Image: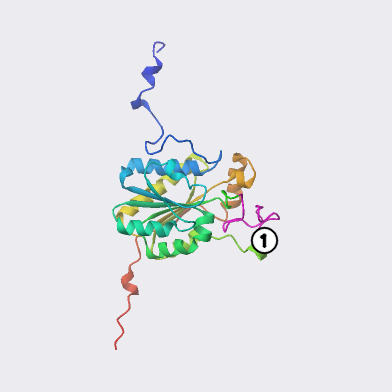
Amino acid sequence: MADLQLQDIIKPENRVYGKSKVLTDKPMHYCYGCSHGVVNKLIAEVIEEMGIQDKTVGVSPVGCAVFMYDYIDVDFMEAAHGKAPAVATGYKRTNPDKYVFTYQGDGDLAAIGTGETFHAVNRGENIVMIFINNAIYGMTGGQMAPTTMLGQVTATTPYGRDVDLNGYPLKITELLAQLPGAAYVTRQSVHTPANVRKCKKAIRKAFENSAKKIGTSFVEVVSTCNSGWKIDPVASNKWMEENMFPFYPLGDLKDSERLDIEQYKVQKLKK
């Protein structure tokens, strides 16, 4: 055993874990402790494991992940703020055999893009939508987002979100789960190793559903933004667990094939 050399141990066949080949070597610009990097990694791993790198197209709009095309080595399209579902719809319909996913934050998907989000899911577009909910506008300076918690201090709510002034946090995932075009709707996180594994499983299921052509798959990831929240990464995870999870509980909200529309068809009007 004493004669065992390092080169005898460090071999490809002995590797337990490593960087996905779908991830590029470019350093990510995300803040330290941010959830984006982990989710990007999971998407890349799923694409590699499914063997669909040359069949996958991502759509990243305005937000922290606007440079996602630098990190995941698949074809990408940029979309105007909030319009990723519309862009993804157009591409998927003209390229039905491709795996198309959007990657959006709460300011994008749940604010300026609410209309595009709801109608894409209601139509049952066969796309994957990955939604990063960190309860704030991260890229633009930490302003209040639709998902900001009541009492949460942001750049635009210095005294905390007030329901009389700002309304309630938007549970957009629960709303989308009610739509007939939604096949799979889930809420996950990546704040612990166990949750990372669960989130990866959910992302893979969403991509697998895309090939089945059964409707939209929607994966929300409750995340942190320690830069926007002005606290360190460890405290961010604790704050998320104590304040966000009770309001945004983790787990599957819907897991079914597209609704049978025959029961809703009406007879033609007689002249």
Our reading of the magenta stretch's main secondary structure is: loop
Magenta stretch? 141-161
Residue indicated by mark 1: 162
View extreme (right): residue: 159
Residue 59: say if magenta: no
Q: Can residue 161 be seen in this view?
A: yes
Residue 132 pos. (x, y %):
50, 50
Residue 32 pos. (x, y %):
56, 38
Quadrant for the N terminus, please: top left
Residue 239 horizontal side relative to residue 208, left or right: right
Quadrant for the C terminus, please: bottom left
Q: Nearer the viewer, residue 94 or 148?
A: 94
View extreme (bottom): residue: 271
Q: Callout 1 environment at 10 Å: few (<14), some (14 to 19), or many (20+)?
A: some
75 to 8, vertically: above or below: below
Residue 98 pos. (x, y %):
31, 51
200 to 16, vertically: above or below: below
Residue 65 pos. (x, y %):
49, 47
Q: Is residue 256 visible?
A: no
Identified at 55% across, 60% down, the residue is 170
Type of amino acid under label 1 = Asp
